[in-house]
Amino acid sequence: MNLNNYIVLSGLLFSIGAVGVLVRRNAIVMFMSVEMMLNAANLAFVAFAKNSGTYDGQVVAFFVMVVAAAEVVVGLAIIMAIFRSRRSASIDEANLLRL
Amino acid sequence: MDLVFWIPATLAVAGALGMVLSKRAVHSALFVALSMINLAVLYLNLSAPFLGMVQIIVYTGAVMMLFLFVLMIVGVDASDSLKETIKGQRLAATLIGGSFVAVISSMLSSTITTLQSDLATETINAGGNVQAIANLIFGRYVLAFEATSALLITAAVGAMVLAHRERAKPKLTQRETSKKRFEDYALAGKHPGPLPATGVYARHNAVDTPALLPDGSIAPNSVPGPMQARGSVRPVDEYDLQEVKDLSKGELVIELDHEGDHESK
């Protein structure tokens, strides 16, 4: 059991999620990429908790999960509201605030 | 080789890559579910059984199903359009993403040399994992836990407010819809009757099978719109087409024998 492997995996997943947010234009896929980044952070928390032999990292990961669930609920409701008014889930369509 | 790390890790990375690379949002959602399940295995591996179970229940069970529900509402043909609305956006995004990967990897490479490389081998779950987490949540982190409850109820109310829609016009009665249908027929020539049914052949009668007109061409609207948008209309069998043509020319006659079976000459 090597801590470095877990940390490298966490960084890899986080990078893939970040690239997904930047490259994809579909709001739902971008949301999934954000979830992937949150999960990568969780993995690092749990790995460090195991390394230090305490539970604080696991508790923080648990709170991250709760916040992520709440965030998904509100975010998907916003995406649905935008889709209703614009008939599109592409974030480039929502440009009302643009100068 | 530590297979219980490497197998889930490979699958998790594969799921993440599939999420970014697959064109349809539904495929992305399924790839994310794959990633989440494998992360749960990794949590179990890191002696966090409670988090592993919560990961499966909350992420693959609740969050990804929520994503799939929204995808069903937003539409199956909601794939990314290939044209860029902002010029050079894709290139810039790839460049910035690549530099971000470089930053992360350089940070990791400087960090992992200073980390003690082996995970603590002594079991940290001596008094029970769930009990220890409960002690922390209801002890040191009880304020955060209470704030979480406020967050959850705010999210639930917010989602209801955002997803609620007032009916702008009163619901049409059956009489009004019928009147409107024939108004459309009179003004725009829209067919007032039902749409043509899908094709029914001996081999398949699924909804992706188009109906054929007497001349052998495909009847428009006989396949539901979303399936046409996805391009999953079943191609017409050449043999069936030839049969229809021969029948219409009178070169092929189908006779029924007295038992009701088809017999073609």
Image: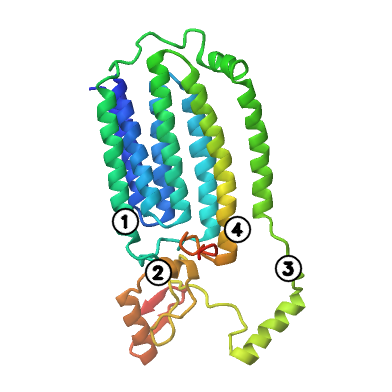
Task: From the viewer's side, name the closer residue of A40 and B123.
Answer: A40
Residues beneath discs 1 and 2 located on the same chain: yes
Q: Is residue A40 above or below residue B122?
A: below
In this rendering, position of residue B174 left or right of residue B252? right
Residues beneath discs 2 and 4 located on the same chain: no
Give me the disc on residue B168.
3
Give me the disc on residue A81.
4
Q: CA distance from mark 3 to mark 4?
A: 15 Å
Amino acid at pointer 2: Val
Q: CA distance from mark 2 to mark 4?
A: 31 Å
Quadrant location of the C terminus of chain B? bottom left
Q: Is residue B176 above or below residue A32?
A: below
Question: Residue A60 placed where, x, y %?
Answer: 51, 25
Which of discs 4 and 1 lies nearer the camera? The answer is: 1
Which of discs 1 and 2 lies nearer the camera? The answer is: 1
Q: CA distance from mark 1 to mark 3?
A: 42 Å
Give me the disc on residue B92.
1
Residues beneath discs 2 and 3 located on the same chain: yes
Residues beneath discs 4 and 1 located on the same chain: no
In this rendering, position of residue A51 left or right of residue A54? left
Q: Chain of mark 3?
A: B
Question: Residue A80 placed where, x, y %?
Answer: 58, 56
Indicate the secondary structure of the residue bearing disc 2. loop
Amino acid at pointer 3: Ala
Which of discs 2 and 4 lies nearer the camera? The answer is: 4
- Residue beneath the point at 46% across and 27% down: B52
Task: From the viewer's side, name the closer residue of B69 and B211.
Answer: B69
